[in-house]
Image (cartoon, rainbow, N blue to C red):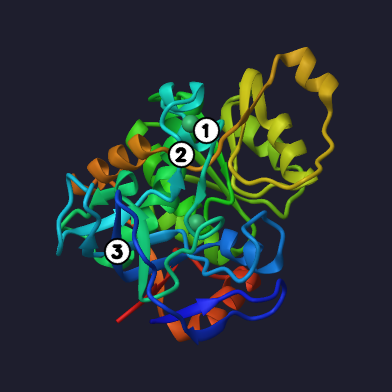
Amino acid sequence: MKAMVLKEYGKPLVLEEVSKPKIGNAEVLLKVKAAGVCGTDLKIQQGLVPTKKLPLIPGHEIAGVVEEIGQGVKDFKVSDEVLVSYYVSCGNCRSCLAGRETICENLKGRLGFEFNGGFAEYVAVPEACLLPKPSNISFEQAAVVSDAVATSYHAFVRRAGIKEGDYLVIVGGGGGLGLHAIQVAQNLGANIIGIDISDNKLETMRNLGVKKVLNGQKLDWSKAVFNYTDGRGADYVALFACTNDTVREGINSLRKGGKLVFIAYSTEISFNALKCHLNEIDILSTRAATRSDIEDSLELIREAKVKPIISKILTLEELNDGLALIKNGDLTGRLAVNIK
Ligand SMILES: [Zn+2]
Ligand SMILES: [Zn+2]
């Protein structure tokens, strides 16, 4: 089969002919129809995220058709159209039993990180990772749900508990993840303040119905948040861009007792812990999305309350061009590869 293989960090992926994966008892062989490409794939290519020893076939946002099933597979059959939850967890530890499998204590790995992923014609997937694809969306749209939509659902609903009327600042709201975060937050009834750094992205947020947008290049945007909230401050600041500047302004934007929610990450950040102490600011970290977050996200999509936005579709061979587009930072919406 054809696959895009990462052989060396920092180098382009290489199109290769490799053998089809063999499936285990509780796995299916999936004919990949589409795979989402996201910022994390760029980080993987650059060697900034831990993965298995190279070579690796990345691609964690996967949708396709079941081609073959292992003997122990119960709930899926050949020809089923599915998408994939890419965390392969143990199902038995404290975290898993609490429904928090992205922080599984015995995490077996993730498709596209520790296991080969979807930038290939076929991928082996454990049955426990499969979800039925809604019929009202394309394979490209289905592929990105597990990350682009469900990550925000996880952060806003499961972790932060955002409710109707809450003031929520979305930092990086014009990017591929942010545009889906906005839709999830609109469904919750939040008052959204969208922040990004290009006019293009501010316009995209406005077109989605965000009434208040701010240019994050004005380095003291927290003052504008206070003005907009009549001096009260935001209830939540969600960071889809994580730098010293966004963290500082995020903390400065919050009301007393507000929550700073990290969706983006970087290794070291400095911030004013005294200010957090004086105002009992909660620092909340979130990691990806659980299977039930993806199920709930799919429900929103079936009801047409959220629409996965794909801005560009490439062929598998063009994947390196896609990573370059992400690096240059001017995509609005998500990128996917279509695999024939
Ligand atoms: Zn992703
Ligand atoms: Zn576990």
* Viewer-closest of 292 and 7: 7
Q: Residue flagged by tag 1: what amino acid is it?
A: Cys
Which image quarter: residue 270? top right
Q: Measured along the vertical axis of the image, is residue 173 above or below residue 281?
A: below
How far across and down, in percent of the image, does residue 52 sit? 62, 58
Residue at disc 2, secondary structure: loop
User: According to the image, label 1 marks what residue?
Assistant: 104
97 with respect to 65 (left or right): right
How far across and down, in percent of the image, does residue 2 sit? 41, 83
Question: Which label lies toward us, 1 or 3?
Answer: 3
Q: Residue at x 34, y 60 (%)?
A: 23
Are the residues tagged 1 and 3 within 8 Å (C-beta)?
no
Q: Residue flagged by tag 3: what amino acid is it?
A: Leu
Mark drawn on residue 29: 3
Q: Earlier in the sequence, mark 1 or mark 3?
A: 3
User: According to the image, label 2 marks what residue?
Assistant: 89
Q: Measured along the vertical axis of the image, is residue 161 above or below residue 129?
A: above
Residue at disc 1, secondary structure: loop
Which image quarter: residue 237? top right
The reply to whether residue 109 is visible in this rendering is yes
37 with respect to 74 (left or right): right
Label 1 environment density (alpha carbons within 10 Å; few <14, some 14–19, many ≥20): many
Ligand 2 lies under 8 Å from the Cβ of mark 2? yes
How far across and down, in percent of the image, does residue 117 sit? 46, 63
Ligand 2 lies under 8 Å from the Cβ of mark 1? yes
